[in-house]
Protein backbone atom coordinates (compact mmCIF):
# COMPACT_ATOMS: atom_id res chain seq x y z
CA UNK A 1 0.00 0.00 0.00
CA UNK A 2 1.14 3.54 -0.70
CA UNK A 3 -0.25 6.95 0.23
CA UNK A 4 -2.02 8.53 -2.77
CA UNK A 5 -1.11 12.10 -3.72
CA UNK A 6 -3.68 14.89 -3.18
CA UNK A 7 -4.26 14.99 -6.95
CA UNK A 8 -4.95 11.22 -7.04
CA UNK A 9 -7.32 11.48 -4.09
CA UNK A 10 -9.21 14.32 -5.73
CA UNK A 11 -9.61 12.14 -8.82
CA UNK A 12 -11.05 9.35 -6.67
CA UNK A 13 -13.46 11.79 -5.04
CA UNK A 14 -14.50 13.12 -8.44
CA UNK A 15 -15.13 9.65 -9.87
CA UNK A 16 -17.02 8.62 -6.70
CA UNK A 17 -19.90 10.98 -7.40
CA UNK A 18 -21.66 7.68 -8.17
CA UNK A 19 -23.50 7.05 -4.88
CA UNK A 20 -22.57 3.36 -4.63
CA UNK A 21 -20.67 2.75 -1.38
CA UNK A 22 -19.14 -0.46 -2.75
CA UNK A 23 -17.82 1.37 -5.82
CA UNK A 24 -16.36 4.14 -3.69
CA UNK A 25 -14.52 1.64 -1.50
CA UNK A 26 -13.02 0.02 -4.61
CA UNK A 27 -11.91 3.43 -5.93
CA UNK A 28 -10.15 4.12 -2.62
CA UNK A 29 -8.37 0.78 -2.69
CA UNK A 30 -7.54 1.20 -6.37
CA UNK A 31 -5.61 4.41 -5.77
CA UNK A 32 -3.62 3.02 -2.84
CA UNK A 33 -3.14 -0.70 -3.60
CA UNK A 34 -2.76 -0.61 -7.40
CA UNK A 35 0.89 -1.62 -7.16
CA UNK A 36 0.11 -4.96 -5.52
CA UNK A 37 -3.33 -5.99 -6.78
CA UNK A 38 -5.45 -5.74 -9.90
CA UNK A 39 -8.95 -4.24 -9.79
CA UNK A 40 -10.39 -7.77 -10.11
CA UNK A 41 -8.35 -9.03 -7.18
CA UNK A 42 -9.41 -6.07 -5.00
CA UNK A 43 -13.09 -6.66 -5.86
CA UNK A 44 -12.72 -10.33 -4.87
CA UNK A 45 -11.27 -9.63 -1.40
CA UNK A 46 -13.49 -10.80 1.47
CA UNK A 47 -15.12 -7.70 2.96
CA UNK A 48 -13.17 -7.99 6.20
CA UNK A 49 -9.89 -7.86 4.29
CA UNK A 50 -11.23 -4.91 2.28
CA UNK A 51 -12.11 -3.07 5.48
CA UNK A 52 -8.72 -3.83 7.04
CA UNK A 53 -7.05 -2.19 4.03
CA UNK A 54 -9.43 0.78 4.26
CA UNK A 55 -8.50 1.19 7.95
CA UNK A 56 -4.81 1.16 7.00
CA UNK A 57 -5.46 3.75 4.28
CA UNK A 58 -7.45 5.89 6.71
CA UNK A 59 -4.51 5.90 9.12
CA UNK A 60 -2.16 7.02 6.32
CA UNK A 61 -4.49 9.79 5.15
CA UNK A 62 -6.04 11.20 8.29
CA UNK A 63 -4.20 9.67 11.26
CA UNK A 64 -4.75 6.81 13.69
CA UNK A 65 -7.44 8.38 15.90
CA UNK A 66 -11.08 8.07 14.81
CA UNK A 67 -13.54 10.34 16.65
CA UNK A 68 -17.12 9.14 16.57
CA UNK A 69 -20.04 11.24 17.80
CA UNK A 70 -23.39 9.52 18.09
CA UNK A 71 -26.67 9.83 19.99
CA UNK A 72 -27.50 7.51 22.89
CA UNK A 73 -30.42 5.32 21.68
CA UNK A 74 -31.92 5.43 25.19
CA UNK A 75 -31.75 9.09 26.25
CA UNK A 76 -30.57 10.82 23.03
CA UNK A 77 -27.56 12.43 24.73
CA UNK A 78 -24.62 13.11 22.42
CA UNK A 79 -21.87 10.56 23.12
CA UNK A 80 -18.32 10.98 21.86
CA UNK A 81 -15.62 8.35 21.73
CA UNK A 82 -12.18 8.06 20.16
CA UNK A 83 -10.98 4.79 18.67
CA UNK A 84 -7.59 3.96 17.23
CA UNK A 85 -7.36 2.33 13.82
CA UNK A 86 -5.23 -0.42 15.35
CA UNK A 87 -7.94 -1.13 17.98
CA UNK A 88 -10.46 -1.63 15.18
CA UNK A 89 -8.22 -4.12 13.39
CA UNK A 90 -9.36 -7.71 13.96
CA UNK A 91 -7.63 -10.91 12.83
CA UNK A 92 -8.09 -11.80 9.18
CA UNK A 93 -10.65 -14.43 8.27
CA UNK A 94 -9.02 -17.84 8.29
CA UNK A 95 -10.34 -18.93 4.90
CA UNK A 96 -12.46 -17.46 2.14
CA UNK A 97 -14.86 -20.38 2.25
CA UNK A 98 -16.23 -21.83 5.44
CA UNK A 99 -18.33 -24.83 6.42
CA UNK A 100 -21.50 -23.33 7.88
CA UNK A 101 -24.27 -24.73 10.08
CA UNK A 102 -26.11 -26.53 7.29
CA UNK A 103 -24.28 -25.33 4.21
CA UNK A 104 -20.78 -24.28 3.32
CA UNK A 105 -20.39 -20.76 2.02
CA UNK A 106 -17.75 -18.35 0.80
CA UNK A 107 -17.25 -14.94 2.39
CA UNK A 108 -19.02 -12.03 0.64
CA UNK A 109 -16.83 -9.65 -1.37
CA UNK A 110 -17.26 -6.33 -3.21
CA UNK A 111 -18.71 -8.06 -6.29
CA UNK A 112 -21.52 -9.36 -4.08
CA UNK A 113 -22.17 -5.88 -2.66
CA UNK A 114 -22.35 -4.44 -6.18
CA UNK A 115 -24.87 -7.14 -7.16
CA UNK A 116 -26.92 -6.54 -3.99
CA UNK A 117 -27.20 -2.83 -4.74
CA UNK A 118 -29.59 -3.69 -7.55
CA UNK A 119 -32.02 -5.44 -5.18
CA UNK A 120 -35.29 -3.68 -4.42
CA UNK A 121 -35.45 -4.55 -0.70
CA UNK A 122 -33.61 -6.21 2.16
CA UNK A 123 -35.34 -9.58 1.73
CA UNK A 124 -34.38 -9.74 -1.94
CA UNK A 125 -30.80 -8.73 -1.05
CA UNK A 126 -30.55 -11.47 1.58
CA UNK A 127 -31.89 -14.09 -0.84
CA UNK A 128 -29.43 -13.03 -3.52
CA UNK A 129 -26.51 -13.03 -1.09
CA UNK A 130 -27.31 -16.62 -0.08
CA UNK A 131 -27.72 -17.63 -3.70
CA UNK A 132 -24.31 -16.18 -4.54
CA UNK A 133 -22.36 -17.28 -1.46
CA UNK A 134 -23.79 -20.62 -0.35
CA UNK A 135 -21.64 -23.26 -2.01
CA UNK A 136 -23.25 -26.51 -0.98
CA UNK A 137 -26.30 -27.61 0.95
CA UNK A 138 -26.26 -31.12 2.34
CA UNK A 139 -29.10 -33.36 1.24
CA UNK A 140 -32.21 -32.97 3.35
CA UNK A 141 -31.36 -29.38 4.27
CA UNK A 142 -33.14 -26.93 2.03
CA UNK A 143 -32.14 -23.29 2.01
CA UNK A 144 -33.54 -20.98 3.25
CA UNK A 145 -33.66 -23.43 6.15
CA UNK A 146 -31.18 -21.26 8.04
CA UNK A 147 -30.55 -17.90 6.37
CA UNK A 148 -30.17 -16.17 9.74
CA UNK A 149 -27.78 -18.88 10.93
CA UNK A 150 -25.73 -18.55 7.75
CA UNK A 151 -25.61 -14.76 8.17
CA UNK A 152 -24.39 -15.24 11.75
CA UNK A 153 -21.81 -17.81 10.67
CA UNK A 154 -20.59 -15.40 7.98
CA UNK A 155 -20.17 -12.64 10.56
CA UNK A 156 -18.31 -15.00 12.90
CA UNK A 157 -16.02 -16.16 10.09
CA UNK A 158 -15.09 -12.61 9.05
CA UNK A 159 -15.61 -10.35 12.10
CA UNK A 160 -13.76 -7.41 10.51
CA UNK A 161 -16.58 -7.12 7.98
CA UNK A 162 -19.11 -6.75 10.79
CA UNK A 163 -17.20 -4.40 13.07
CA UNK A 164 -19.04 -3.26 16.19
CA UNK A 165 -17.97 -0.40 18.42
CA UNK A 166 -18.61 -0.37 22.16
CA UNK A 167 -20.34 2.69 23.59
CA UNK A 168 -21.52 3.58 27.09
CA UNK A 169 -23.66 6.65 27.66
CA UNK A 170 -22.20 8.87 30.42
CA UNK A 171 -25.68 10.17 31.28
CA UNK A 172 -27.77 7.01 31.59
CA UNK A 173 -25.10 4.23 31.49
CA UNK A 174 -26.81 2.55 28.54
CA UNK A 175 -24.39 0.31 26.63
CA UNK A 176 -24.70 -0.50 22.94
CA UNK A 177 -22.60 -1.72 20.02
CA UNK A 178 -23.29 0.14 16.78
CA UNK A 179 -21.82 -1.21 13.56
CA UNK A 180 -18.90 0.77 12.19
CA UNK A 181 -18.69 1.03 8.40
CA UNK A 182 -15.15 2.18 7.59
CA UNK A 183 -15.98 2.47 3.87
CA UNK A 184 -18.76 4.97 4.49
CA UNK A 185 -16.82 6.78 7.24
CA UNK A 186 -13.66 7.20 5.15
CA UNK A 187 -15.67 8.44 2.17
CA UNK A 188 -17.33 11.13 4.31
CA UNK A 189 -13.90 12.23 5.48
CA UNK A 190 -12.58 12.27 1.93
CA UNK A 191 -15.55 14.39 0.84
CA UNK A 192 -14.94 16.98 3.57
CA UNK A 193 -11.19 16.96 2.81
CA UNK A 194 -11.80 17.47 -0.93
CA UNK A 195 -14.12 20.44 -0.41
CA UNK A 196 -11.62 22.02 1.98
CA UNK A 197 -8.71 21.46 -0.40
CA UNK A 198 -10.62 22.92 -3.35
CA UNK A 199 -11.37 26.03 -1.31
CA UNK A 200 -7.63 26.39 -0.66
CA UNK A 201 -6.88 25.92 -4.36
CA UNK A 202 -9.48 28.56 -5.16
CA UNK A 203 -7.90 31.07 -2.77
CA UNK A 204 -4.35 30.49 -4.00
CA UNK A 205 -5.34 30.48 -7.68
CA UNK A 206 -7.22 33.77 -7.27
CA UNK A 207 -4.25 35.39 -5.54
CA UNK A 208 -1.24 33.98 -7.36
CA UNK A 209 -2.83 32.77 -10.64
CA UNK A 210 -1.14 29.37 -10.29
CA UNK A 211 -2.51 26.31 -12.05
CA UNK A 212 -4.48 23.75 -10.00
CA UNK A 213 -1.88 21.02 -10.61
CA UNK A 214 0.91 23.26 -9.31
CA UNK A 215 -1.05 24.15 -6.18
CA UNK A 216 -1.85 20.47 -5.50
CA UNK A 217 1.84 19.63 -5.87
CA UNK A 218 2.76 21.96 -2.98
CA UNK A 219 3.40 20.23 0.33
CA UNK A 220 0.62 20.87 2.89
CA UNK A 221 3.03 22.96 4.96
CA UNK A 222 4.05 25.20 2.08
CA UNK A 223 0.43 25.52 0.91
CA UNK A 224 -0.56 26.58 4.42
CA UNK A 225 2.22 29.18 4.53
CA UNK A 226 1.01 30.76 1.26
CA UNK A 227 -2.58 30.70 2.52
CA UNK A 228 -1.51 32.64 5.60
CA UNK A 229 0.34 35.16 3.43
CA UNK A 230 -2.71 35.88 1.31
CA UNK A 231 -5.24 35.89 4.18
CA UNK A 232 -6.99 39.26 4.35
ZN1 LIG B 1 -28.07 7.71 27.48
Image: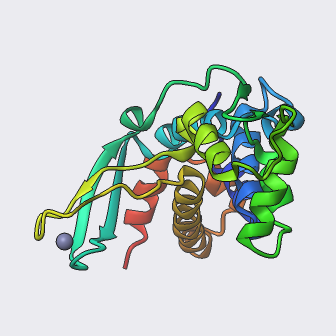
In the rendered image, the vertical position of residue 99 relative to residue 23, given as above or below: above
How many marks on residues? 0
Q: Which of the 4 image quadrants contains residue 228?
A: bottom left
Quadrant field for ligand 1? bottom left
Quarter that holds the C terminus: bottom left
Q: Which of the 4 image quadrants contains residue 136?
A: top right
Q: Is residue 135 left or right of residue 82?
A: right
- Could you tell me which residue is drawn at 68 percent across and 57 percent down? 10
Q: Nearer the viewer, residue 195 or 63?
A: 63
Q: Is residue 109 left or right of residue 6?
A: right
* Residue 81 visible to the viewer: yes
User: Residue 164 in the image: x percent, y percent?
Assistant: 43, 49
- Could you tell me which residue is drawn at 36 percent across and 34 percent down? 87
Q: Nearer the viewer, residue 117 or 20?
A: 117
* Residue 57 visible to the viewer: no
Q: Which of the 4 image quadrants contains residue 211?
A: bottom right
- Could you tell me which residue is drawn at 51 percent across and 43 percent down? 58
Q: Is residue 146 left or right of residue 170?
A: right
Amino acid sequence: MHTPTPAQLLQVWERGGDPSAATRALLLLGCSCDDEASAEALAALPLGRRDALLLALRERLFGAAIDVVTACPQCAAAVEATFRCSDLRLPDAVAASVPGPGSSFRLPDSNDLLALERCSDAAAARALLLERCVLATPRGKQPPEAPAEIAQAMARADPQADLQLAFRCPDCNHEWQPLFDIARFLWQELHAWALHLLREVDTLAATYHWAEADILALSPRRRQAYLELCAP
